[in-house]
Amino acid sequence: MRAGNVDRVAPRESTEEATVPEAAVTTDTLLLDRPEPARRSARKRVTRADLFAGAAYLGLAVLVLSGQWRDTGGAYLIKSGQDQTMWEWFFAVTAHSVAHLENPLGTTLQNFPAGVNLMANTAMFGVGVPLTPVTLLFGPTVTFVLVLTLGLALTAFAWYRLFSRELVASRFAAALGGLFCGFAPAMISHANAHPNFVALGLLPVIAGLLIRMSRRRADGPRSGESGGTAGPGSLGPESRAVRGRDAGAVTIGSHPAGFDHVGTPGGAARVGMRARGVRLRDTLLLALLVTAQIALGEEPLLIFAMSFALFAVVYYLHAPRAGLRALRAVVPTVAVAGLITLALTAIPLWWQFFGSQSYRSIDHGPMGNDLKAITQFPSESLGGLFAPGQPVAINETEQNAYFGWPLLMLLAVAMLWLWRDRVVRAATAVILVFGVLSLGATAMIGKRSTGVALPWRWAEQVPLVNSVLETRLTMAAIPAIAAILALAAQRAVSMWRESAVDWRPLAWFTATALALFPLTPTPLPVVDRAGTPEFFAHGTVRDYVGDGSVVLVPTPRPDDAEPLRWQTEDDFSFPLAGGYFVGPTSGDKKGIYGPEFRPTTALLVGTRATGVVPEIGPDERANAIADLNFWRADVMVLPPTRNADALRSAVTELLGFAPTRIEDVWLWDVRALR
């Protein structure tokens, strides 16, 4: 028996599935080159290496978020801006809705009385609902940091499992790929504020299911056949022993691996029944996985779907007939799974796109990656600590393309080294295509426009796609890069096993370590939270609110969302005017961050920024009364803030009466004005 191949075994007169002795699979045999039973057995086993990899990923994730874990009550991830406050509010209001048996898809507790469409605001019901007990018992900050921590660790582990099952035989190579997928610069950047772009562990599970569906359908016996060689339905590298033919084309006797012998009595019927059973199981599982991912984040799912489709197309370019067979085999199952998914998500999706406070699309403006970012190190890394570059990302939570020049050089060498491998060619296509798309409509270098038009100019005209921040498209390259690194590590391990004195594996692993070392993440920085005003902390606000709202001076908005935390700490005893969310404009239903500014909001925001009370006349007073009626305001509250004296004077002039000091806030009771 040769390394990397499996000799034919004489068929047995038995209805049992054919198997291959474990000893028949050498260390150089990739999983995709094993018979289906051997692959299935390998996939089900959880080894000590798997447990070690999972523990290592979890430990690293805890380290990255250690600052927040040390003080969940008082620490705040400073680079999140106001996003951490927003996400904690999402988790808190979801738990509140579940506990009070209210509709979790929308609420008027923020942006009163119009409310917020939570389904259109990535509220992550997929974790918010099941983690309701955690939120109610320990608070939304614990839920927030728990989702981020498990998101990093489980994403890494899920990709590790996919690579070890379907791509490489070496657990070390798979672990290296999983490490990069879970802790790439973009993942660490989003761990500051965006759990929906950190909890990505279902995507490799979906990918693995699609790969196995393609392999089983394409490799199974077709109508009228009694067996034969398996078709090219496997995604995976060709080892040297099987180079020149499709990986996964393994036959035991004259029958495809994993099926009963058709020639035995009743064998054909059992094959058909088994095929139908597998198809039903695959359909339901795929539908449930996609439904769950929609509940976690639709934007990552869209990016994954586009990149996986591109990968598959390029993978089958050299064998279009095999690709068509795989496509015909998978499409019916995917189509039925899609219908089931639509049925399961019909109400949430209808609410998202047609319900109260829904919007058609959101115009982010130019959000592409700067070309300089690609070669620089991320800020939260050892490289960024010792060799910081120009800050060219759109913000510190969107450092999606900071791969660093050493990794780019290593990647180029790996691509040339492994170019004959179909997986490498397909992964390279994903890296290049989505890398270019992520640059936006016009190429930028050092925040200066080059004037060069790029493909995103046309891609952003596509519905749904135009709502994606183009910088995030770089995240499609992360698993593609990881796959190439894993394959290169597998090749180096194989060379080392062939000759322990070969210098090339040592050189490769040294180069890999030097390329990845600067990207080693550092703990995310935190600061102390500001205290909650006593008026809200003691629950005094409840004495002044009936069926109306609390209007903060000025109202909360995307750049100042701290009052959302005060509302959460008082168990949502009052609704707030304004807030931080995505909602529609009054005209064309375009999505914007926060509510449209009302005249009184604009006046008070300007007063706080300048410390100067503007001229206030009859028009401003009339606008103030109209705005209070719109908000159905019970009270206006001025908490401790900068330029508080100017704000107090401005509101007093607008309303025509002075406020009352209640604990540590100034309060205007405005119920009589509406």
Image (cartoon, rainbow, N blue to C red):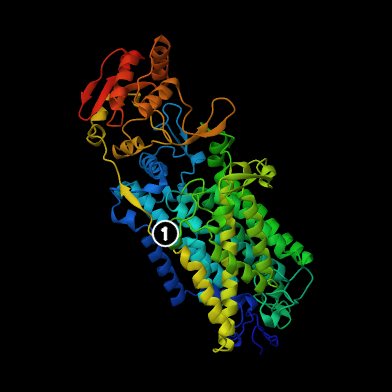
Q: Is residue 466 above or below residue 293?
A: above
Q: Residues within 10 Å of mark 1 (few under 14, many from 20)?
A: some
Say left or right for 109 vs 247.
left
Compared across the picture, whether 597 is left or right of 504 comes to left
**Visible in this render: residue 431?**
yes
Residue drawn at (61%, 49%) of the image: 439
Q: Mark 1 points at which residue?
A: 385
The reply, left or right, for residue 56 in relation to residue 655 is: right
Q: Which residue is drawn at 43% across and 68% down?
A: 54
Q: Give amino acid for label 1.
A: Leu
Relative to residue 178, is residue 451 depicted above or below?
Answer: above
Q: Splitting the image into 4 quarters, where does residue 568 fall?
A: top left
Quadrant containing the C terminus is top left
Identify which residue is drawn at 50% across, 75% down. 45
Q: In this view, does 427 lie above or below 80?
A: below
| 185 to the left or right of 275 | left
Residue 545, position as x, y percentages in the image: 30, 25
At 48% from the left and 27% from the top, the residue drawn is: 596
Q: Can residue 216 be seen in this view?
A: no
- Numbered disc 1: secondary structure: helix
Camera-nearest residue between 206 and 311: 311
Q: Residue furthest top?
A: 618
Up the image or down, 165 lies above or below 596; here it is below
